[in-house]
């Protein structure tokens, strides 16, 4: 059973979903709708229906992970809805309830947590040269390989100051600042959410093997 009252009290839903006139402007301009069988208008329809079964189904599916969070829909909706923000709330509740692990795109969240999330926790950066590998990004092609083989030269072109004290891109983030990031992640509940994400994906893979 999903926590329906808590979901509908989420400020992202309260403040970004008014009556929808089903005009389809959000779908017409949504870049994700060009790539996937996806309509932000459908998201609004399901959430406004207050149907817990339909909502749970939506939160368990790939559908909520198609949105690119560009927020183009927010600027153009004649009812001042922001489907992208509503999606963001549904993603949170999908993770919080473990429903995300029922869909393939949902389960990818564990990879985001283990890469970007862990980088932020360890170093204060989303992406950092010390955490990259050549093998993990074959799609980048020969430029990527050149960067790996000529790291110092490549990063000097953007005045990088990798892992050193002082100013500049990729400078070392002080221990105090990293500790503050830890406090923020703990205080906002992000660490608990990460644990839920890891455990839900583990449980799903154990159940799938049974
Ligand atoms: S643009 Fe706004 S009113 Fe129109 S379908 Fe989308 S959410 Fe509904
Ligand atoms: S925020 Fe999401 S739903 Fe809105 S236009 Fe961008 S991709 Fe589409």
Image (spheres, rainbow, N blue to C red):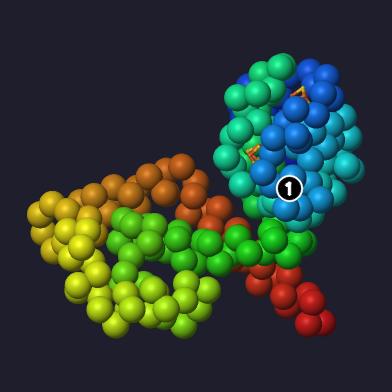
Residue at x 89%, y 35% (from the top left corner): 51
Residue at x 69%, y 22% (from the top left corner): 77
Residue at x 73%, y 65% (from the top left corner): 104
Q: Closest to the observer: 184 or 16? A: 16
Residue 92 left/right relative to 99: left
Residue 112 lies, in percent from the top left, at 53, 62
Residue 95 left/right relative to 111: right
User: Which image quadrant is residue 13 in?
Assistant: top right
Residue 161 lies, in percent from the top left, at 16, 62
Q: Residue furthest front?
A: 142
User: Which image quadrant is residue 118 in?
Assistant: bottom left
Quarter of the render that holds ligand 1: top right
Q: Quick one: SS at disc 1?
A: helix
Residue at x 18%, y 65% (from the top left corner): 156
Residue 145 lies, in percent from the top left, at 38, 80
Residue 135 left/right relative to 157: right
Q: Is residue 66 above or below residue 170?
A: above
**Residue 23 visible in the current orientation:** yes
Quarter holding the C terminus? bottom right
Q: Is residue 121 above or below residue 12?
A: below
Residue 100 left/right relative to 188: right
**Residue 1 visible in the current orientation:** no
Counting the numbered discs, the total is 1
- Density class for disc 1 (Cα within 10 Å; few <14, some 14-19, many ≥20) is few
Kindly identify which residue carries mark 1: 34
Q: Closest to the observer: 107 or 151? A: 151
The answer to whether mark 1 is within 8 Å of ligand 2 is no
Residue 21 lies, in percent from the top left, at 83, 19
User: Which image quadrant is residue 22 in?
Assistant: top right
């Amino acid at each position: 059973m999903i926590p329906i009252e808590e979901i509908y009290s989420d400020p992202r839903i309260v403040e970004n979903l008014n009556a929808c006139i089903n005009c389809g402007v959000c779908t017409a301009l949504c870049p994700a709708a060009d790539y996937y069988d996806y309509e932000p208008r459908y998201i609004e329809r399901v959430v406004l229906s207050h149907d817990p079964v339909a909502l749970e189904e939506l939160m368990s599916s790939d559908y909520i992970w198609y949105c690119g969070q560009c927020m183009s829909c927010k600027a153009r909706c004649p009812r001042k809805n922001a489907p992208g923000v509503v999606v963001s709330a549904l993603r949170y509740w999908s993770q919080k309830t473990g429903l995300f692990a029922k869909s393939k795109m949902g389960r990818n969240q564990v990879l985001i947590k283990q890469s970007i999330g862990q980088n932020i926790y360890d170093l204060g950066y989303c992406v950092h040269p010390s955490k990259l590998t050549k093998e993990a990004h074959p799609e980048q092609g020969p430029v990527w390989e050149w960067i790996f083989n000529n790291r110092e030269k490549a990063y000097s072109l953007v005045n990088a100051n990798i892992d050193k004290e002082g100013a500049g891109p990729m400078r070392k983030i002080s221990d105090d600042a990293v500790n503050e990031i830890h406090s923020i992640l703990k205080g906002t509940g992000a660490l608990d959410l990460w644990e839920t994400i890891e455990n839900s994906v583990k449980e799903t893979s154990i159940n799938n093997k049974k």
